[in-house]
Image: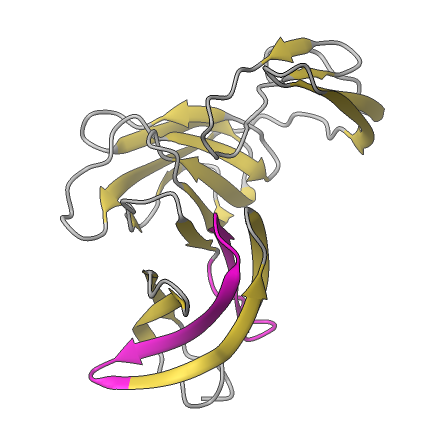
C-alpha cells in the first residue's frame, strides 16, 4: 500500500493482519491548509485500487509541558514495552514508544486537552484521553490495557463522556454475527444491548449510554459474540454523574 500527500510519500506492506496504520507526518512539512492524500493499494494477485481524500493541517504548537505515563497489562499488572503512543488530537502532535518498564514521555508539549492512540506491538489498539495538561510536569494515571489473545474480536474505548453520559466504544470483528453488551459489578449484571448486528471484518462504533442503574466506580463492560460465545471485556471507571 502506498500513501502520498502533497509533500511526502510512504509505502507499507501488510501481511494478512489487521491493525491501524499510523502515518508519520512529523518529519515532513505540510502546509497549514487544505492537503490532498492518495491511498493506492495493490494485492499480490495484481488487483489495484486507489482513493483520494482531503484534510486540513493544524499548526504545530510547542510548550513547556512534560507528559509522563505508564502502560500496564490489565490482568497481570506487568509493564507493556514497545507500544506506540501517538497524539491523535491536541495542541501538539507527537509520537513515542513505551520503555521496558512500560513508561513513556512527551516533552515540549503545549498545555491543553489531549487524546492519545496506543498501538500495542502485537496489533491491539486503544484510545485514552487526558485533560488539563499544564505547563509543568504532568504524570498521567497508569493505562491498564486488556491484552487480547485473538484477532477475531478486538475491543477498545475512550474515557466516559460526562457531558453526554456515554462511553465511546469500538469493536472489530473478523466474523459477522450478533453481539450483546452487558456490564458487571459485585455479582450484579445488566444487559445494555441484546443484539447488535456486525458484518465480517468491520469496525463498529457505539456510544454506550450510562443509565441510572449503572453504578459509579469501576465496572466490567463485556461484549460477546452470540454465535461463537467469544467474549472481550474492559474495566472502566465511571465518575459520579448528575443522574446517579
Q: Who is closer to the viewer here, 228 or 39? A: 228
Segment tinted magenta in the rendering: 159-188
Q: Quadrant of residue 119?
A: top left
x 63%, y 11%: residue? 10
Looking at the image, residue 197 sits to the left or right of residue 185; the answer is right
Q: Quadrant of the N terminus?
A: top right
Q: Residue furthest front?
A: 45
Q: Main secondary structure of the magenta part?
A: strand
Looking at the image, residue 32 sits to the left or right of residue 218; the answer is right
Residue 113 lies, with reference to residue 234, above or below; the image says above
Residue 222: x and y, percent?
35, 68
Q: Who is closer to the viewer here, 108 or 26? A: 26
Q: Who is closer to the viewer here, 58 or 156? A: 156
Q: Is residue 45 visible?
A: yes
Residue 234: x and y, percent?
34, 61
Residue 132 lies, with reference to residue 85, above or below; the image says below
Q: Quadrant of the C terminus?
A: bottom left
x 42%, y 54%: residue? 155
Q: Is residue 28 visible?
A: no
Find out whether residue 170 is within the magenta segment: yes
Residue 18: x and y, percent?
48, 35
Residue 53: x and y, percent?
81, 30
Residue 162 lies, with reference to residue 30, above or below; the image says below
Q: How many marks?
A: 0
Find out whether residue 225 is within the magenta segment: no
Q: Residue furthest right?
A: 34
x 46%, y 89%: residue? 212
Q: Who is closer to the viewer here, 142 or 236? A: 236
Looking at the image, residue 124 sits to the left or right of residue 115; the answer is left
Amino acid at each position: 500500500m502506498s500513501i502520498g500527500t502533497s509533500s511526502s510519500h510512504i509505502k507499507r506492506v501488510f501481511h494478512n493482519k489487521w491493525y491501524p496504520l499510523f502515518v508519520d507526518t512529523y518529519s515532513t512539512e505540510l502546509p497549514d491548509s487544505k492537503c490532498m492524500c492518495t491511498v493506492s493499494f495493490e494485492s499480490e494477485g495484481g488487483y489495484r485500487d486507489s482513493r483520494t481524500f482531503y484534510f486540513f493541517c493544524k499548526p504545530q504548537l510547542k510548550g513547556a509541558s512534560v507528559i509522563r505515563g505508564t502502560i500496564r497489562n490489565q490482568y497481570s499488572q506487568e509493564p507493556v514495552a514497545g507500544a506506540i503512543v501517538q497524539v491523535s488530537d491536541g495542541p501538539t502532535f507527537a509520537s513515542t514508544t513505551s520503555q521496558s518498564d512500560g513508561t513513556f514521555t512527551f516533552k515540549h508539549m503545549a498545555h491543553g486537552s489531549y487524546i492519545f492512540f496506543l498501538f500495542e506491538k502485537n496489533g491491539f489498539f486503544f484510545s485514552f484521553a487526558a485533560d488539563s495538561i499544564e505547563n509543568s510536569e504532568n504524570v498521567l494515571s497508569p493505562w491498564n490495557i486488556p491484552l487480547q489473545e485473538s484477532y477475531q474480536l478486538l475491543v477498545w474505548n475512550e474515557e466516559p463522556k460526562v457531558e453526554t453520559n456515554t462511553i465511546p466504544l469500538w469493536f472489530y470483528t473478523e466474523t459477522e454475527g450478533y453481539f450483546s453488551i452487558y456490564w458487571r459489578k459485585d455479582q450484579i449484571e445488566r444487559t445494555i444491548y441484546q443484539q447488535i448486528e456486525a458484518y465480517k471484518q468491520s469496525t463498529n462504533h457505539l456510544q454506550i449510554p450510562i443509565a441510572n442503574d449503572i453504578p459509579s466506580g469501576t465496572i466490567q463492560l463485556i461484549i460477546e459474540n452470540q454465535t461463537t460465545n467469544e467474549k472481550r471485556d474492559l474495566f472502566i471507571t465511571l465518575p459520579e454523574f448528575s443522574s446517579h
